[in-house]
Image (cartoon, rainbow, N blue to C red):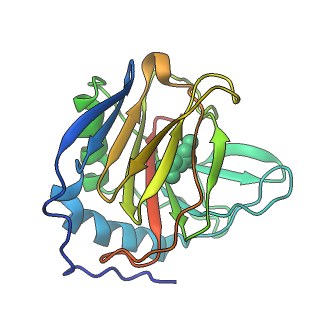
Amino acid sequence: MQTTFDLFADTESEQPRRADQIGEQSWVLRGFALPQIDQLLPALESIIACAPLRHMMTPGGFSMSVATSSCGALGWITDRNGYRYSSEDPVSHQPWPAMPEVFRELAQAAAKRAGFADFVPDSCLINRYVPGAKMSLHQDKDENAYEAPIVSLSLGLPATFLFGGFARGDRSQKISLLHGDMVIWGGVDRLRYHGILPIKPGRHPRLGEQRFNLTFRTAG
Ligand code: SIN
Ligand code: FE2
């Protein structure tokens, strides 16, 4: 697995910045994170050096296809006992690494741009997808309250994001997400179903054969 990122591959400079509204209170901010990429990638590397990515087990006994870690006060975990947040890494029994300032500021700026001015994330879930890995349709509902939006950052290989309705069977929009794109959904859209189609084989110039998704939430 590649854990050192090529700081010098530069292909993202020309991606157009744009805000696409995908729901009443949901936005895709294209290329929003690109100006911070040189600070974000080393911070991500340090976190996964302290709290290595691992394939967690669902309550039903399946190993997730994404490999996961966290930073911030709370980290989302799953095992045979269910989905929940924990203040410690269940592998090391240490607190999760602190959320880097550059992560928090980016998440807050993106939330603000999408109309959520006082977002204070206490959790950042890190998901690593290799080609073939996916995330089935689900709602984010393990948080204590739903007032805060979900703020997500895509890095590396492209993905197709499914953005659905309030029932699993509702029709989903298919949204292509590239390196540096951010998605924010909250308010009336907070409990929409969403997921990721299997990642297609490929090589990102900076991150190689992988995609990272960082999901910022107010969990506690
Ligand atoms: C998730 O909803 O947990 C992940 C979404 C993504 O990978 O973009
Ligand atoms: Fe989610």
The residue located at (57%, 25%) in the rendering is 191
Left or right side of 11 for 166: right
Residue 72 appears in the rendering: no
Q: Quadrant of ligand 2?
A: top right
The percent coordinates of residue 203 (x first, y second) are 40, 77
User: Is residue 17 depicted above or below 156 in this figure?
Assistant: above
Residue 204 appears in the rendering: yes
User: Is residue 173 depicted above or below 36 in this figure?
Assistant: above
Q: Quadrant of the C terminus?
A: top right
Residue 23 picture quarter: top left
The residue located at (59%, 28%) in the rendering is 144
The percent coordinates of residue 142 (x first, y second) are 64, 35
- Most foreground residue, 153 or 202: 202
User: Is residue 4 depicted above or below 167 in this figure?
Assistant: below
The percent coordinates of residue 15 (x first, y second) are 19, 56
The percent coordinates of residue 58 (x first, y second) are 77, 53
Left or right side of 99 for 117: left
Left or right side of 105 for 155: right
How many marks can you see?
A: 0
- Most foreground residue, 57 or 98: 57
Residue 150 picture quarter: top left
The residue located at (58%, 24%) in the rendering is 165
Residue 100 picture quarter: bottom left
The residue located at (30%, 76%) in the rendering is 206
